[in-house]
Amino acid sequence: MTNDQATHLPGFAGDLFLRLAAEGRLVLEPGVADETIAALERTLREVRNRLQILGTASNPGHETTGRLEEAAIELPKYIDALRRARRGAPEDPNRTRPPAAGGRTLDH
């Protein structure tokens, strides 16, 4: 990959995360998801605060402001995707369920 190609790579993948979560291919343990969501929500608040301080109208086209604006759009996508991923993959009726405590399957 050339340096020119690297500079044109997107910095965020919110739409990809949403698609993976919707397909059930992004799955997180509830505790991990909750911690990550909380961290992203704190980050989003900070991004919004910084944008307010910078005043986007007084800094049009400024690189930092542009990245913060992009983050303000993309971070909610990540949060939504992780909320979906927390619920896990859609149930597959053909999937074998793991045995519950005592060696019995969850289906019985």
Image (cartoon, grey):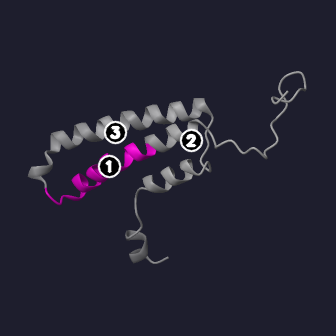
Residue ID for mark 3: 44
Residue 87 image-quadrant placement? top right
Q: Percent x, y for residue 8? A: 38, 70
Residue ID for mark 2: 85
Question: Toward the viewer: 58 or 80?
Answer: 80
Circle 3: element type:
helix
Q: Are marks 2 and 1 in contact (CB under 8 Å)?
A: no
Label 1 and label 3: CA atoms lie apart by: 9 Å
Q: Which mark is residue 102?
A: none
Looking at marks 1 and 3 on the same chain, the residue that comes earlier in the sequence is marked by: 3
- At 40% from the left edge and 59% from the top edge, which residue is drawn? 11
Disc 2 crowd rating (10 Å Cα; few below 14, some 14-19, many 20+) is many
Q: Answer with left or right where residue 28 lies relative to residue 57.
A: right
Name the kind of residue labelled 3 in the image. Answer: Leu
- Image quarter where the C terminus lies is top right
- At 36% from the left edge and 38% from the top edge, which residue is drawn? 43
Q: Percent x, y for residue 15? A: 44, 55
Provide the major secondary structure of the magenta segment.
helix
